[in-house]
């Protein structure tokens, strides 16, 4: 069965960094579609100026990979619901959907991580966009995406190494490793699903 891995989390959560190890070495996934990397390829010195074009190229690549049945991954903040239809499309084409969410414990930490990335030559995200995406991404994870993915894992990446907080495989019950954090986040962000 073809696999679709969605690497999600707020800006600065370490999604790309984690993907470079997790995808090829642990999940044996060799195709990673990343709009930020596409933008850097289009305009290395001003990638933010081609973000819409990079997003379009990313979606074209994703739909091509689904059409040929390749296993692949892509990265997102989950701050919009636009990937819901893509997930349904992939499932209808025989894909199993795995969502890996990398959480940071505050908006300020997300802003710090992005500032550090910029100081090291990486791309910038405006602070108000970081804050908006942070909250929307968590709300969408809890209220939409965890319910439509076949498998999901939620990691706290606030410190040196990611810590598994909770996970679910197929129709099995959730496995919660960090109970206090999980229930705090669920009570704050969850609107429709019962715990």
Image: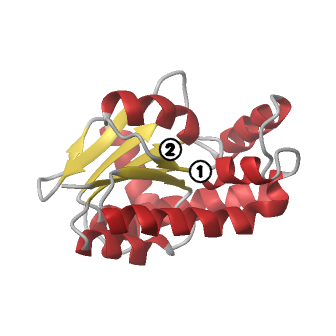
160 w.r.t. 35: above or below:
above
Residue 119, percent from left and from top: 84, 31
Q: Quadrant of the N terminus?
A: bottom left
Label at residue 103 = 2
Residue shown at the point (62%, 65%) measured from the top left: 57
Q: Is residue 179 left or right of residue 184?
A: left
Color style of the picture: secondary structure
- Mark sitting earlier along the chain (2/1): 1
Quadrant location of residue 26? top left
Q: Residue furthest right?
A: 45
Pick the front one: 13 or 1: 1
Q: CA distance from mark 2 to mark 1?
A: 7 Å
Q: Is residue 6 left or right of residue 150?
A: right
Q: Is residue 91 visible?
A: yes
Label 2 close to label 1 by CB (< 8 Å): yes
Q: Is residue 177 left or right of residue 122?
A: left
Label at residue 69 = none
Label at residue 10 = 1
Secondary element type, mark 1:
loop
173 w.r.t. 25: above or below:
below
Badge 2 crowding class, 10 Å Cα cut-off, few under 14, some 14 to 19, many 20 or more, is many
Residue shown at the point (50%, 44%) measured from the top left: 103
Residue shown at the point (36%, 40%) measured from the top left: 29
Residue 195, percent from left and from top: 25, 61
Badge 1 crowding class, 10 Å Cα cut-off, few under 14, some 14 to 19, many 20 or more, is many
């Amino acid at each position: 069965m073809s696999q679709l891995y969605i690497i999600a989390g707020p800006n600065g959560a370490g999604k790309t960094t984690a993907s470079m190890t997790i995808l090829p070495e642990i999940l044996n996934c060799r195709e990673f579609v990343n709009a930020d990397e596409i933008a850097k390829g289009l305009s290395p010195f001003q990638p933010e100026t081609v973000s819409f074009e990079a997003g379009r190229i990313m979606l074209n690549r994703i739909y091509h990979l689904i059409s040929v049945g390749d296993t692949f991954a892509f990265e997102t903040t989950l701050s919009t619901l636009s990937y819901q239809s893509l997930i349904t499309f992939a499932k209808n084409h025989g894909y199993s959907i795995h969502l890996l969410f990398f959480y940071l414990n505050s908006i300020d930490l997300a802003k710090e991580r992005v500032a550090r990335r910029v100081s090291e030559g990486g791309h910038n995200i405006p602070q108000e966009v970081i804050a908006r995406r942070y909250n929307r991404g968590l709300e969408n994870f809890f209220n939409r995406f965890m319910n439509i993915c076949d498998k999901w894992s939620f990691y706290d990446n606030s410190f040196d190494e990611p810590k598994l907080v909770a996970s679910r495989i197929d129709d099995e019950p959730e496995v919660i490793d960090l109970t206090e954090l999980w229930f705090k986040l669920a009570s704050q962000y969850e609107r429709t699903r019962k715990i």
